Each structure stands twice: as structure tokens, then as C-alpha cells.
Image (tube, grey):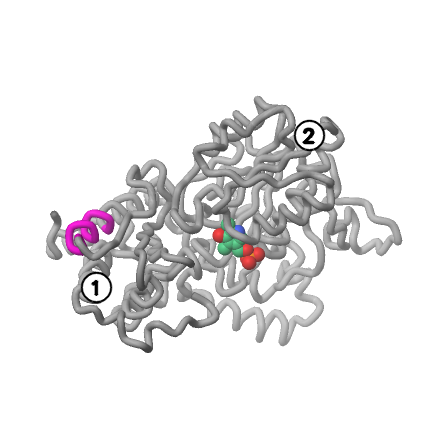
Amino acid sequence: MKDKSACLRQDEADRLRGLRGQFQLNDDEIYLDGNSLGVLPRATPARVRQMVEEEWGEGLIRSWNTAGWIDLPARLGDKIARLVGANAGELVVADSTSVNLYKAMSAALSIVRADAPGRTRIVSERSNFPTDLYIAEGLARQYGMTLELVEPDEIPAQLDDRLAVLMLTHVNYRTGRMHDMAALTRDAHDAGALAVWDLAHSAGAVPVDLNGAQADFAVGCGYKYLNGGPGAPAFVWAHARHADRFSQPLSGWMGHAAPFQFTPDYQPAPGIARYLCGTPPLLSMAALECGIDTVLAAEPLGGMAALREKSVALTELFIELVEARCAGHGLVLASPRDAAQRGSQVCFARQEGAYAIVQALIERGVIGDFRAPDILRFGFTPLYTRYVDVWNAAERLEQVLSEGAWREARFQRQAAVT
Ligand SMILES: *Cc1c(COP(=O)(O)O)cnc(C)c1O
């Protein structure tokens, strides 16, 4: 097993180590929750201040043109496209992940309804993130279809001639299990259905190739691995073969072919621009761009492939250290042991005290999170996480468990956000 000095040497040799300097990090803390809220990039405060003081304060309404505000959803979309195997012009930033999923799923269901009206099943994973399931449940009701939830291993058997849409999150939020996007999309297509992917835990975390996988629609999140800040806008992508087929259901003026003609009737913009709805949250867009840029900064160093290589090394190290040092403390690996099937996070289940253990760890400067009912979740963002952080986190976890510190009453009181 590695010792601490080996971790320090690995950090020295890490060609991505300079990327950490892009972030405002407290060196006394180990932040393992970038899969929930990415860290603040150093560039963000100045950029947001510039937009407030110069573009808004001085430029006022002119800034829509002079500061390029109107182009931000497409410009940021083009940047994210580079991270997920999409082409320029195929992806836009808009709304939230939940809202984008509603738009993408509606479009997918409309296409299937037109091409193959007998198909009435939407299939997803039982442990998919709740908002995805709730959105699909609402749409199933609206379209007179059924939503069926299955375990990951049961998915291939569900792809039949009544399937309309296979809707999956590429990397599961609870377990970190990663689906084979290309294989499942191919299977869904062979069954005559469409595949809609949520990249919330993938964009900026693992290599994604939407066009290579021939996926139909995708959505993703701006505030996790893209470091866009709390409540950052999300993104939506449609394969070029679908982009012009249907107008999305939230037919707002920003998705109109000519918003400033102010015509009374709706004409969708060509391509992905129709997936815009209303006026974008520009301050949040400015912050998101700084976040995306922190990931693009890895491009000259090998890009997503290099980030993935480090992410795998970090998660392997954490599993190895925790299993060795915390043996006998009731932690059970809840993420796939095979790195090829794992995203950039590691989760352990524990029958008792998972919430309190996470709180006790946070007090000791290791920030992970708890996912009900029994999961301790740790995200490893290769942009800023060091090997020595992994070593220290495992050590503090061992201390919390062996000292029983988590049993104190103050760690048991559950806050609104876990
Ligand atoms: C984080 C996450 C979301 C978040 O959706 P919001 O609309 O931003 O609240 C949705 N889906 C998945 C799979 C997520 O991990």
C-alpha cells in the first residue's frame, strides 16, 4: 500500500498539478464534493464583477450587442460541446437540468409518437436521480405512456418493440456506476427506440462522445464538474438528425427563429437554438463560462483523457486506502470495483451512522456528502484533488470511525441539505 510520501511524490510528478491553481481552495480542507457543487474558480469573481459594473452598470441595454450577451447560450454551448463529443452549434446552455430534461424527453417522445405510435414504454433506472424520474413520470402521464424502472443489469432485456425512450443518467449519482453509452444507445436503436442521456455526473468528469455513441438527446449540469457556481444554468444537446424535427414544448421567444421581429406566431429557430426558452440568467452564465474554462484548460495537457486517467488513479487509491485502513468498521464499497464502470466518485454504504460520519468528517476538514439512506459519497475532481488529499481523507475517515467521534449527538441532527 502507498504511504503518504509516495502520494506526495505522485503529486510532484502529476502533469495536471498546475490546474489546481485555478481554484480558490482552503489548503486545510479536502473538498470531495465537486460532484455536488464545484469549487469557485479564481477568475469568477472578477468576471462577474466586470459584467455587473461594466457591462450592466455602464453598457446597460447596449451590452446585449456590444458585450455579446445574446450569444452567450450558444458560445458556452460550443465550449461544453468540446467536452462531450458534440460539434459546435449542437449544444446550448439554458435553464436547469430538470427543465432541459423535460424539453429533451418531450421532443424524443414526440418523435417516437409520430414514427411508431404503438410504443408506450419509457424505461429508466430505479436509482436514477429523483428529478429525472419525476420529470419522466409527469411526461408519461401527459403522453399516456408508462414509466418503468429497472435495475441496471435488467436494462438490455427491457429494450423491446414497445419501448419509446430509454432515459438514463450516464453516471449514477448514488453509486458512481457508469453505463456504456454507445452500447446501450445501439441496443435501444436496434429495438426501434431513442436514447436520452443525462450527463450531470459526466460532463467535465469522464470522457463522453455523444456523436460517437449516436445518442439522440442529452442534458447536463453546470454546477457540478463544470464549476459554474450554485444554481448554474444547465445544457441540452440534440443529435443533428433530430434537432429540426420538433419544436420543444417550452416554445419561448428566445427559441424563436427571429425573436426581435416580435411576430405573434411561434416559428422555432433552426437547430438547437429552439431549445432556448426565455431570457438567460446572464450573471450565472458569466460564472459558468469561467467554470467551463477551468476544464478546457486541461486541453493542452491531454484534455478529458488525461483528467480521466488521474480520476481513475484517485478513486483507485481511495478505495485501496479505505478498505485497508477502515477494515472492520462496516463500510461496504457501493461503487463498482472495476474502474471502467465507475465515474469520478466513490461511495461506501454503512448500515448505521452514515450521515453522522459524514458530518464528523466535515468537521475535520474532509467535505463529502451523505445520500439517504446509507451512502457516504466522495467525489474526486482531478482538476484540483491531489493524491495527498486522498491519503489524508482516508486517514481522517479512519480516525472518525475508530474514535467513534461520529456518535456525538450534534452529528445526528440532519440538516435540510445533506
Ligand atoms: C444534479 C442532478 C440534477 C440536478 O437537476 P437540477 O434541475 O439542477 O436541480 C439532475 N439530474 C441528475 C442526474 C443530477 O445528478
Which residue is under mark 2?
119
The range drawn in magenta is: 318-327
User: In the picture, which quadrant includes the C terminus?
Assistant: bottom left
Residue 335, percent from left and from top: 34, 45
Left or right, 6 with respect to 287, comes to: left
Residue furthest right in the image = 264
Q: Secondary structure at mark 1?
A: helix
Residue 149, percent from left and from top: 54, 41
Q: Secondary structure at mark 2?
A: loop
Mark 1 CB near ligand 1 (8 Å cut) = no
Disc 1 and disc 2: Cα gap in Å?
A: 51 Å
Label 1 neighbourhood size at 10 Å, few (<14), some (14-19), many (20+)? some
Q: Is residue 61 something that shows in the picture?
A: yes
Residue visible at 69% across and 61% down?
279
The image shows residue 7, relative to residue 189, as above or below, that is below
Q: Nearer the viewer, residue 326 or 42?
A: 326
Which residue is under mark 1?
401
Q: Is residue 299 something that shows in the picture?
A: no
Question: Residue flagged by tag 1: what amino acid is it?
Answer: Leu
Residue 363, percent from left and from top: 29, 73
The image shows residue 201, relative to residue 43, as above or below, that is above
Prevailing secondary structure of the magenta residues: helix
324 in magenta: yes
Residue visible at 74% across and 38% down?
246
Residue furthest front in the image = 351
Q: Nearer the viewer, residue 310 or 216?
A: 216
Instruction: Find residue 59 and name its label.
Output: none
